[in-house]
């Protein structure tokens, strides 16, 4: 790995200038991500969407060296700046000394999702989907993405309105999962639920007032787990479209679980039944 403090050929793609901050007002077609995991994951793809990187010049550890090596393999510009410069570029976030400019992730449509589901079924694989009905906290979205990938989910679906998208914070919290796991935002969630049912996907919603426990039902076939927003649960119309509604058995006095924790419980129960 190249030493970030060395000179010579290892510095071919590294520029040190007093300021390297982009003008985001004139960068509407680019996205900015931060954090070591998120940027490393974006660089690990054969064709990376990263176009430029800013690194804190006071960091000289192996993780920064790995990012520099990956950037060099993609022939990317790496700017060495001060931590204060990075703080100004993306204030109030834990950037870990690393910020990258990227082209946007490809937006997946409802037809893209339905094709994915059809292809999985045609190939003998039972789709496992996670549907988030109005989760607005990007930290929770990122955590759900990380959990969903670990459990073997094939995609995450969310409405476009009144829900978090893939912000820089969600990307960081996902620890790279957002680069690999399809994320589909839809304009009409109820319509998509009906379309999924028509393809043979069983919709299982979650609610504390259900009479059926999660561990009492079969989760082996084509399946979508539907979770609601923080504190509100799934909406009435969403619940009406579910084939089954279950509750997660809990002990103690806690009334509910964080949505990312609930996603983990439900998805890993499905994975267990499928022989993970």
Image (spheres, rainbow, N blue to C red):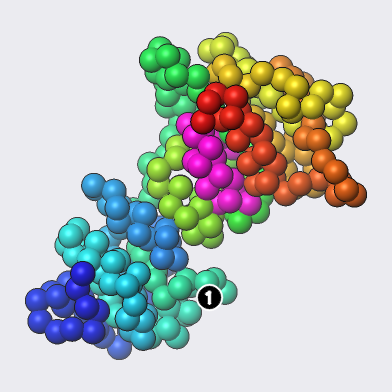
Look at the image and tell me in which quarter the N terminus lies.
bottom left
Q: Where does the image place residue 237, in percent across and percent down from the top left?
A: 76, 26
The residue under the point 40% across, 43% down is 180
Q: Where does the image place residue 17, in percent across and percent down from the top left?
A: 26, 85
Identify the magenta region. 140-158
Residue 184 can be seen, yes or no: no
The residue under the point 22% across, 66% down is 69
Give left or right: position of 249 versus 21: right
Place residue 12 in its image quadrant: bottom left
Give left or right: position of 145 versus 232: left
Queried whether the magenta region covers residue 255, the answer comes back as no
Q: Where does the image place residue 204, in percent across and percent down from the top left?
A: 69, 24
Give left or right: position of 193 versus 231: left
Foreground residue among 170 and 176: 176
Find disc 1 in the rendering and name its residue. Answer: 91
Q: Is residue 230 above or below residue 89?
A: above
Are there few (<14), some (14-19), or many (20+) residues within 10 Å of tag 1?
A: few
The residue under the point 24% across, 79% down is 4
Q: Is residue 228 above or below residue 254?
A: above
Q: Is residue 174 above or below residue 212?
A: below
Residue 44 can be seen, yes or no: yes
């Amino acid at each position: 790995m190249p030493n970030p403090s060395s000179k010579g050929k290892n510095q071919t793609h590294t520029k040190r200038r007093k300021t390297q901050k982009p003008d985001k007002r004139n960068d509407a077609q680019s996205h900015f991500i931060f954090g070591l995991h998120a940027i490393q994951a974006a660089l690990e793809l054969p064709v990376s969407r990263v176009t430029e990187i800013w690194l804190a010049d006071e960091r000289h550890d192996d993780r920064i060296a790995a990012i520099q090596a990956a950037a060099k393999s993609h022939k990317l510009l790496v700017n060495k700046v001060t931590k204060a410069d990075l703080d100004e570029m993306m204030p109030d976030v834990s950037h870990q000394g690393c910020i990258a400019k990227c082209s946007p992730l490809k937006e997946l449509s409802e037809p893209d999702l339905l094709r994915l589901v059809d292809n999985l079924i045609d190939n003998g694989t039972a789709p496992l989907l996670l549907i988030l009905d109005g989760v607005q906290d990007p930290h929770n979205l990122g955590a759900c993405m990380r959990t969903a990938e670990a459990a073997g989910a094939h995609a995450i679906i969310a409405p476009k309105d009144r829900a978090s998208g893939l912000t820089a914070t969600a990307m960081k919290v996902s620890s790279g999962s957002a680069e690999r796991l399809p994320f589909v935002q839809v304009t009409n969630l109820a319509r998509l639920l009906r379309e999924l049912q028509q393809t043979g996907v069983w919709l299982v919603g979650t609610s504390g007032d259900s009479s059926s426990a999660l561990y009492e039902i079969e989760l082996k076939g084509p399946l979508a787990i539907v979770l609601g927003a923080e504190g509100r649960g799934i909406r009435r119309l969403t619940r009406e479209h579910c084939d089954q509604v279950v509750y997660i058995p809990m002990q103690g006095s806690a009334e509910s679980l964080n949505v990312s924790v609930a996603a983990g419980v439900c998805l890993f129960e499905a994975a267990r039944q499928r022989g993970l």
